[in-house]
Amino acid sequence: MVLLRFAPSPTGPLHLGGLRMALYNYLYARKFGGKWILRIEDTDVTRSVSGSVEGIRKALDWAGLDYDYGPDKDDRYGPYYQSERRDLYKSYANKLIDNGHAYRCFCSADHLDDVKARLARSGSRSTYDKKCLNLSDEEVARKVKAGEKFVVRINDGIPPARAPTHDLVFGNVRDAHQSLATDPVLLKSDQFPTYHLASIVDDHEMGITHVLRGEEWLPSLALHLDLYAHLNLTPPQFAHVPILLNADKTKMSKRKGDVQVVDYMRRGWEPRAMLNWLALAGWGAKFEATSSIESADSSSPTSSSGSHRIEDAPDSTHLMTLEEMISDFDLSALTHRSSVLDMNKLEYINKHHLMKTWSTPDGLDRLAHRVHGVVKDAFPSSQYTTVDNIKHAILLLEGRLTNINDIPQHAPYLFVEPDLSTAEARNMIKRFSSEQRAHVLDALAALIHMNGWLTFSAASNESTMESLHAEREKLGMSQKHFMVVLRHALTGMKDGPGIVDIMRVLGPERVFSRLSAANESGKGEK
């Protein structure tokens, strides 16, 4: 069975890059009938932040990314917190020591700093002089018995016999040992493992078949494959995903910018739109096979990335359901470059996901209930913030809403009386005299009275506009000026949906009240 894992560190809220990585693991597992695990990599106790795990799980639940195994779920692969698996890491570290592929290092931090500086001055690429590699067993035993602190380092001077380093996204990659520290630490002095040891131990013990993780770990892939070989274990297949960038093309970080998933949850973005946006950030590359990568069938979970041309890869604003993402997801369609997240694309995708949702009665009802609290908070004294009124507002603003939480911003006049004292409202009618405005408002009121509200509201937009144009012609006004006066009286805002649609949502009492109020306001002006 295909089995993957999403393994965040509890160092703060889940960020967009983490959500995309969780999504990719979810898509790959579901596409190939597999499962995925949520594993918490909490071995760096100095960076752990209280409440992070709950926040991560809440974000995944909001996005609809249900993991199969993890905290408070099926425990067959548990425990799922690495801090609860320390004895396991120690046993594997001891195996590496026993077979000569790792050793205990007792060097102090000051000594290590001095050695690193000396090696750098000499032009060496090494970062450690391997001083403790040659300690005798008796010396090591004596130091351990004396309680001296130590770390466990891999002995990278003994390369194992193994296959070339291969990645499902980047293909065969060059050896990157030179970019790593000399004899990297596997077990720290506090006896917590580093990522290098913990990840390979857990992936093996949990039976992980495919590891999808960030590109930042690609330089460590050779080291991790070495560890599998030293322990005589079969490694999973690796796929390293290029990272996401901020709009200024800097690396996305929890400490910089609006990158936390919780911010998007609070802002009211649609979960499916967020997944659509993140899935397509870097998905859609089109390239041909290179001579160093063998062709493979992309429908297989063991296929090599980059092995063929993707003729129909989706573009970055292609609208997709989660089911379509699962069906179409293909590691070979991932670009090899980092991707900038474009908020304009999220707005476009979110808008169309909203339109699809409110096109059904159930979807419209869900949206109205979801945004009900936002509208009530915006207009706490209004009697018009019912769910039914919000449904009318959503349909009225169709095509204008990019985010459901923007209803109060786009149409406050549906819930409270328009403020005709604002600069925007005053500028709308500054070219008209109070008499001109009164003529327009009286004409509309007379038209409604003459036809009756039910007849007026039941008529088509076309026939209603014809009636309004007839009144406009009697007054000798341009269409633009006539409609501006009406829009000012009813909304106090220069932009918005069609006047007739607004009037139907407001209803007769509110329409007549606003026409009268605007008339009185005009009489008080010079």
Image (spheres, rainbow, N blue to C red):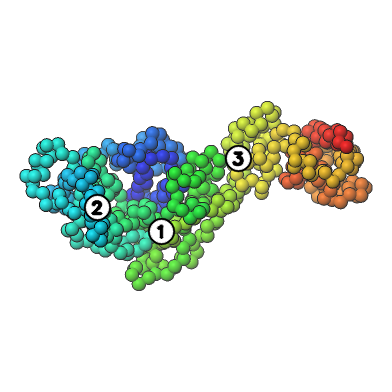
How far across and how far down the image is residue 368, in percent? 62, 37
The picture places residue 47, in percent across and down from the top left corner, at: 35, 39
390 to the left or right of 307: right
Residue at the image position 52 percent from the left and 60 percent from the top: 315
Residue at 37 percent of width and 44 percent of height: 8
Q: Amino acid at mark 3?
A: Asn
Residue 235 sits above or below residue 412 on the image: below
Q: Which residue is mark 3?
A: 405
Residue nearest the observer in this picture, 356 or 61 = 61
How far from the left and from the top, in percent, is residue 326?
A: 45, 53
Q: Amino acid at mark 1?
A: Leu
Q: Pick whichever of labels 3 and 1 is earlier in the sequence.
A: 1
The Cα–Cα distance between marks 3 and 2, rounded to whole angstroms, is: 54 Å
Q: Which residue is mark 1?
A: 331
Is 116 situated left or right of 29 in this image? left
Which residue does the image show at 29% across and 60% down from the upper left?
176
Label 2: element kind? helix
Alpha-carbon span between mark 2 and mark 1? 40 Å
Out of 262 and 284, give the one closest to the viewer.
Answer: 262
**Quadrant position of residue 523:** top right
Question: Relative to the observer, which residue lies in front, 131 or 75?
Answer: 131
Tell me the residue that label 2 is attached to.
Answer: 116
| 2 or 1: mark nearer the eye | 2
Q: Is residue 268 visible in the rendered structure shown here?
A: yes
Where is residue 107? Give x, y as percent: 18, 45
Q: Is residue 221 visible?
A: no
Q: Name the side, left or right, on which 269 lies relative to 226.
A: right
